[in-house]
Amino acid sequence: MSWGARYDESLRAILTRSHWVFDLDGTLTVPVHDFAAIRAQLGIPDGSDILGHIDSLPEREGRLLHEKLDGIEDELAGRAEPSAGAVRLVEALRGRGVRLGIVTRNTKGIALRVLESIGVGRHFAPDDVLGRHDALPKPDPEGLRILSARWETSGAAMVMVGDYLFDLQSGRAAGAATIHVDRTRGFRWPDFTDLAVESLEELAEWLG
């Protein structure tokens, strides 16, 4: 079998999986988060994981920063736009009967609001949208494992789609196939990536 044939077979195996999980910001939406600016607003050291830093703080201080972060993200949610191919891909998957979920480091409430505003909210059951208070944040795979248990399936039937390393690490740890969406085509994390695309439009094209 040629390399091209093996690649096509692997691609088909991923695209025909029955349960897909998406990251939200920068994956289903056009990226609007300036994480350096958010760290500065919250007084978090440069380069630190925002949620990891907040969760390491004493309870009262951490709660106040979570509330401040919620306010920042609420404002950003008002500017959400679907990424290229996002609506087409979601509709194509639902047309095939695929079960869809979200695992995001945003709150569930903000995620549900964004999904509605970009025109795909009706395709995601609210219980299948998990935010940072519903599961340990990515790269921990807990969110995907919660969904796999709820769906009564396994990682072997799941796909994790995201634009950042944490998405890919969580998918790999849960046994899911991983799709890296990278508008720059830098594809920096090949060890955690099963399929790399520039946009969701490419996936939508393959699905037909």
Image (spheres, rainbow, N blue to C red):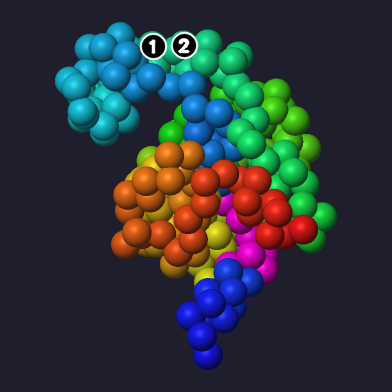
Residue in the foreground of this view, choosing between 55 and 6: 6
The residue depicted at 32 percent of the width and 14 percent of the height is 37
On the image, which quarter does residue 121 sit in? top right
* Circle 2 SS class: helix
Specify whether residue 172 is in view: yes
The residue identified by callout 1 is 68
Q: Is residue 12 above or below residue 166?
A: below
On the image, which quarter does residue 20 sit in? bottom right
Q: Are marks 2 and 1 in contact (CB under 8 Å)?
A: yes
Work out how far the residue at label 2 is from the one at label 1, CA to CA, in angstroms: 5 Å
Residue in the foreground of this view, choosing between 125 and 14: 14
- The span picked out in magenta is 13-21
Q: Is 181 a magenta residue?
A: no
Q: Is 16 a magenta residue?
A: yes
* Circle 1 SS class: helix
Residue in the foreground of this view, choosing between 74 and 146: 74
Viewport quadrant of the C terminus? bottom right
The residue depicted at 70 percent of the width and 48 percent of the height is 89
Q: Amino acid at mark 1?
A: Lys
Q: As drawn, which residue projects farthest toward the bottom?
A: 1
Q: Position of residue 99 (x, y in %)?
A: 69, 56
- Decide if residue 164 is on the left or right side of residue 61: right
Residue in the foreground of this view, choosing between 27 and 84: 84
Q: Residues within 10 Å of mark 2 (few under 14, many from 20)?
A: few
The residue depicted at 39 percent of the width and 43 percent of the height is 164
The residue identified by callout 2 is 71
- Decide if residue 11 is on the left or right side of residue 162: right
